Image (cartoon, rainbow, N blue to C red):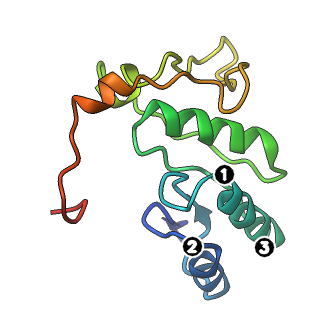
Amino acid sequence: RTPLAAGENHYTRYEFHRMIEDGCMTVVQPDLSKTGGVTEALRIAALASAWKLTINPHTSLTGLNVAAGIHLLCSIDNPGYFEADISRHNPFRDDLCDWRAEVDSDGFVHPPEKPGLGVEFDEDQLRAFPLIDGPGYV
């Protein structure tokens, strides 16, 4: 049997409940930018915990989502792996926030220590990427 990861394009605990109950996934990957943020992700994590499944947040490649995902993993009883973008340069990861996750000598990442999610968001950088109306996928 091969474990199936899913969830990066699912939004609420109701969708996750249906997929978990039906046995459609064994690796739960909510994306905090799509689930409605930390609160709904915590609800999804609690649901997964009841089924003894780990949470492995999908990061969407942004610094803000990376910070939120690491905070989530540090706050739940069923953390799994942290998914990281290891590309050389990703402007959404590197330029939109003043913080970048780093791997320590033991192979772990740690959340930012400042209040909130612990990152400063550069709105000028965000303006360099204007919204394109329509679906997010082609």
- Residue 123, horizontal then vertical, whole percent: 38, 27
Label 2: few (<14), some (14–19) or many (≥20) C-alpha neighbours in 10 Å = some
Q: Quadrant of residue 108?
A: top right
Taking 100 as reference, is 1 above or below it? below
Residue drawn at (61%, 83%), measured in percent from left and top?
23
Taking 68 as reference, is 31 above or below it? below
On residue 109, which mark appears?
none
Q: Quadrant of residue 113?
A: top right
Nearer the observer, disc 1 or disc 3? Answer: 1
**Where is mark 2, residue-wise?**
25
Is 40 on the left or on the right of 65, as rendered?
Answer: right
Taking 56 as reference, is 23 above or below it? below
The C terminus, quarter of image: bottom left
Indicate the secondary structure of the residue bearing disc 3: loop
On residue 38, which mark appears?
1
Q: Earlier in the sequence, mark 3 or mark 2?
A: 2
Indicate the secondary structure of the residue bearing disc 1: helix
Tell which of 135 and 100 is nearer to you: 135
Nearer the observer, disc 1 or disc 2? Answer: 1
The N terminus, quarter of image: bottom right
**Where is mark 3, residue-wise?**
51
Q: How far apart are marks 1 and 2 (CA)?
A: 21 Å
- Residue 51, horizontal then vertical, whole percent: 78, 73
Q: Which amino acid does label 2 sit on?
A: Met
